[in-house]
Amino acid sequence: MSDKTFRSVVMRYPVALVCVGLIAVFVVVFFLHRDVVEALSAQEQDKEARIRVIEGNVNEAKGLESDVEKLESLVQRVDGRLFQPEARSENKDSFYSFEDEFDVLIADVRQLPGEPAALKKGGVHELKLHSVIVYELVVNAEYADVLRFIDGLYRAKPIMRVSDFKISQSRVSGAQGESLTFAFRVYVMSAKG
């Protein structure tokens, strides 16, 4: 194609030539920036997903302050039910207060040293907020009275649980019938000491 022919085509079809030139530029730009567009599209989708998560968290956080207040009041209620580790005699005396109510004779109350391994730091049932004091009780009474006594321990203000229950024949006979000796451990929640 000669110079004159090219000029005549350009003069005859200037709009078509400009359009062909623009299309060529757009095709080159499209192929060069296709990877950038895909990366930006993926980033946009990621940002939109994060925005949805944040909006969901904002919706879930409504009333969070009141939930925290409720939990703090529950912790205070529990704290009011705890034994104080330094008040050893008061803690022991609290068991003797059950004698008349449940018609049992508490023969011995001993505080055992330390916590069970399962409840210590790193244990299977580690207590993070509180501690536990373990007592060994020996009680003389009839079977039904001891069951009522154990139920009373569970229902008492301090949080107590009974384990390692042992029964033996008592040397002391009650007025109503044969008395038995019961030995068991009582786990009492206490403040961290």
Image (cartoon, rainbow, N blue to C red):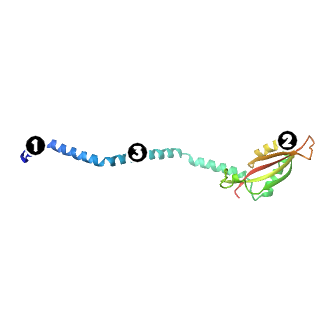
How far separated are the C-alphas under marks 1 and 3?
48 Å
Tell me the SS state at disc 2: helix
Residue under label 1: 9
The answer, for residue 104, to whether it is visible in the render is no
Q: As drawn, is 119 to the left or to the right of 139?
A: left
Q: Position of residue 45 (x, y in %)?
A: 40, 45
Give the mark nearest the N terminus, 2 or 3.
Answer: 3
Q: Which residue is at a point 33% across and 48% down the rendered structure image?
A: 35
How far separated are the C-alphas under marks 2 and 3?
70 Å
Q: As drawn, is 10 to the left or to the right of 63?
A: left
Residue under label 3: 45
Tell me the SS state at disc 1: helix
Q: As drawn, is 101 to the left or to the right of 68?
A: right
Give the mark nearest the N terminus, 1 or 3.
Answer: 1
Residue under label 2: 143
The answer to which of 116 and 103 lies nearer the viewer is: 116
Q: Position of residue 66 (x, y in %)?
A: 59, 47
Tell me the SS state at disc 3: helix
The answer, for residue 165, to whether it is visible in the render is yes
Q: Where is residue 140 in the image (x, y as percent from the top left)?
A: 87, 47
Residue 45 in the image: above or below residue 122: above
Q: Classify residue 18 by image quadrant.
A: top left
The answer to which of 179 and 153 lies nearer the viewer is: 179
- What residue type is disc 1 on? Val
